[in-house]
Image (tube, rainbow, N blue to C red):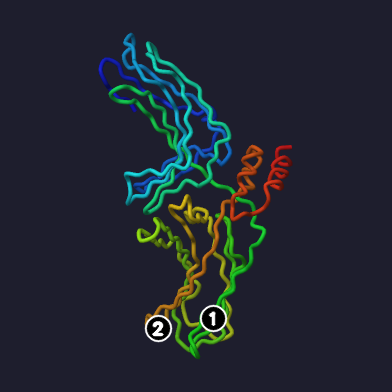
Amino acid sequence: MSFFSFGQSAEIDIVLNDAETRKKVEHKTEDGKKDKYFLFYDGETVSGKVNITLKNPGKRLEHQGIKIEFIGQIELYYDRGNHHEFVSLVKDLARPGEMTQSQTFDFEFTHVEKPYESYTGQNVKLRYFLRATVSRRLNDISKEMDIVVHTLSTYPELNSSIKMEVGIEDCLHIEFEYNKSKYHLKDVIVGKIYFLLVRIKIKHMEIDIIKRETTGTGPNVYHENDTIAKYEIMDGAPVRGESIPIRLFLAGYEMTPTMRDINKKFSVRYYLNLVLIDEEERRYFKQQEIILWRKGDIVRKSMSHQAAIASQRFEGSASAERALAQAKEDND
């Protein structure tokens, strides 16, 4: 990105110190496309260089100071004028003065807190980015660089199974059971459905995974439901006493961890929706919330000790001490 003004102009480039080795992941942009971004975790240091290249050698560039910021912000699409910043760090790179040649400045934000997962939804966007700025009297020169943050968790200490019933008096009685209520993003939902009483003619049955995005507060609450997956359980009429097994693999679907009341701005929750359709096209529903979390075991070897501690921010799960011990073991 370059901006032109009187006499001199410059181009800014931000380069991370570990750009060659740091993992990149795909992340959906606002227009629905996917781009690759550098991946970071809570507690990791963000460091690199800001290269400022003068466009017209020999001419000086006067400025009011040069700085770099690390920002985490939430943008609600219905309130685009307001950016809600939950992380805002600034490093001054140069005092007011003038540049007569291209320069490079080092920067480091140590052990940066990144409490939430990057997210692009129907009505809200949570993003982290670096912004380098050359301040000038008339027009600033700036460059932004987005990164993606994943939040990690350990296995939940409590993970009870889900047992539910669907019933219509004297017509239908179904019990269904899922093996647990909390699943990591690559997990398998295993369950069973029991038909105890069937006096209506069911012709189709499926399980849907519903993502519900909630934004705003009070009277300005918006709900967006998105069907992530449809899993056909059966096509045809069941009989009394029959049981049907369920195995639903989550790895093939695009999902985030469950996000509850993020900075009091939005939530993302997931539900298993059991749908029955009879021969007269009547539909019967039963919905149950499940918790999704991102498994951190694979990357912990490369994580710093304090990033391992930070990874415990899931529903108040397993203690930080145990994570630290595990991280030491893996690093040894």
Figure quadrant of residue 215: bottom left
Q: Is residue 51 above or below residue 131?
A: above
Residue drawn at point x = 51 percent, y = 79 percent: 166
* Place of residue 169 in the rendered image (x, y in percent of width and height, measured from the top left): 49, 88
Residue reaching furthest to the bottom:
170
Rendered-image quadrant of the N terminus = top left
Q: Which residue is mark 1?
A: 174
Q: Name the element at disc 2.
A: loop
| Nearest to N terminus: mark 2 or mark 1 | 1
Q: Which residue is at a point 43% across and 52% down the rendered structure image?
A: 265
Percent position of residue 10, x then y: 34, 20
x 51%, y 25%: residue: 107
Residue on which disc 2 sits: 279
What type is the residue that disc 1 sits on? Ile
In whole angstroms, how far apart are the C-alphas of marks 2 and 1?
Answer: 17 Å
Residue 111 vertical placement versus 236 (above, below): above
The crowding category of the residue bearing disc 1, from other C-alpha atoms within 10 Å (few below 14, some 14 to 19, many at least 20), is some
The quadrant of the image that shows the C terminus is top right
The residue mark sitting in front, 2 or 1, is 1
Disc 2 residue crowd, few under 14, some 14–19, many 20+, Cα 10 Å:
few
Count of numbered badges drawn on the protein: 2
- Position of residue 269 in the picture relative to residue 241 (left or right): left
Q: Position of residue 156 (x, y in %)?
A: 64, 57
Q: Nearer the viewer, residue 207 or 15?
A: 15
Disc 1, SS: strand
Residue type, numbered disc 2: Glu
Q: At which x and y percent is residue 268? A: 46, 57
Q: Residue sitting at 37 percent across and 23 percent down? A: 134
